Image (spheres, rainbow, N blue to C red):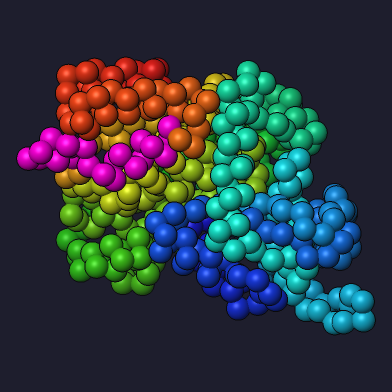
Amino acid sequence: MYKCLMIIILASLSLISCSGEGPLQIEEEIREESQNLPRLFIRTKINLLRIRETPDLEGSVLKIMSEGLITEYMHDSTRFTTKTNYKGKEYNSNWYKVQTQDDIEGWIYSAFAEFLNSEENQKELNIREAEELKEASSKKGPRLNKKQKKELSKPVNEKLVNLYKSYLSSLSKNDPESVSKGISKFKVMIVGSNVRTCDAAYVEFDKFYQKVLLFAARRNMDNYQHLYTEVERYQRSSMLTDDYTRLLARNGFNFSISEGRVVLAEDVDFLYRTFYRECSVTMRSWMNQYQNEEPNFWIDKGTLLISPKKLSRWILTWNYFTKVNPGFVWHDRAKKRLNRQLNILLQGSSGSPVFEEKSYRLNESYLNAYKHIAEKYPNSKIGKSFKEYLSILEADDLKSSRDATEFQSRIIKRFSL
């Protein structure tokens, strides 16, 4: 699911949706309410609507849905349209990719579905999150469909991954064009393998990509500081400044902002367009959340650029992810992100303190974030921990205290180890 691509998709969908609110309108409403939901849901408008394996009328039928059934939009749609006749009426619409609650992922014809309005979407999200957190507390972990279970049971083709790794090592780390060469080889050598092999190969690509980024980032960025306003506003640059920026764009790099300066960063959208579909459901979950957070536009110069409540949602996501995926190849990375975010939510940052400087009272935005975790998920381990923490804070009139500081450390240790 790609942040930049999502903007284009949502804009186009808002123009062609038949009835009900389009996702762009929903996103605007949600933003106004400071909810900023990353997940959208679709309701079927007719009976016997088919989910197909491919976005066309000849695609294999994966499931037949009744009218009013809610599925999750996978942030993907076709730009092409398909003509069809239904009950004597002609339609010419595109296709939405969706996932059902029993984990069937496929395509539905958009003319016969509608996005939930913002209120309905929030309600459905609350239900889904509660179910997922309940599922996370189970030792069984998340549900997987038969196809996913079968794919995950297959061993990694170590020989193939090592060949790909060897190829990457032959490329120049000082040349951004090497990234495209690595991607091309992945498509030829790895695509078509089982998902665990694709995951392993993607991990090797990522190691190589980070090295290329490190070399490229050493270049003097003074000539690109005039892009600061553009990057700050749009969280990326058009990359049309000169031949070098166009080279970077072709190879998966864009600009970000760090410590008040324009710097070179990952173009996560570019990368995931290549690897997302080939990887396992676990790697996709990682990609989805990582993409919400990168490039690093959520904290800069020690100031939190998102609401603490939004940060609390990320924490819930990483807590869930690390619990149900203990054997994931980047489990330690997920733990580090959880640890960092918990530290900021509980102890603040230099530019976004938790307690007011003069009164030592808890900032209301942080209070709302703690309540969100405690009240939304009262039966989960993390919900109970924040409920207990709120009791300690309330006992001291929401002011900073030694007891509060000690309990902050206990929460961080409890969920970061």
Q: Residue at x 36, y 50 (%)?
A: 295
Q: Verify whether residue 357 appears in magenta.
A: yes
Asked whether residue 150 appears in the rendered view, the answer is: yes
Q: Verify whether residue 296 appears in magenta.
A: no
Q: Nearer the viewer, residue 336 or 98?
A: 98
Q: Nearer the viewer, residue 61 or 398?
A: 398
Q: Is residue 232 above or below residue 406?
A: below
Residue found at the far left of this picture: 358
Q: Position of residue 365 (x, y in %)?
A: 29, 45
Total number of numbered labels?
A: 0
Q: Is residue 259 left or right of residue 293?
A: left
Q: Position of residue 286 (x, y in %)?
A: 52, 38
Q: Residue at x 21, y 22 (%)?
A: 405
Q: Position of residue 82 (x, y in %)?
A: 79, 74
Q: Residue at x 72, y 33 (%)?
A: 144
Q: Is residue 12 left or right of residue 391?
A: right
Q: Residue at x 55, y 53 (%)?
A: 122
Asked whether residue 49 appears in the rendered view, the answer is: no
The answer to which quarter of the image holds residue 197 is top right
The answer to which quarter of the image holds residue 417 is top left
Q: Nearer the viewer, residue 405 or 335?
A: 405
Query: Where are the magenta residues, as a range?
Result: 353-374
Q: Is residue 211 left or right of residue 303?
A: right
Q: Position of residue 252 (x, y in %)?
A: 44, 55
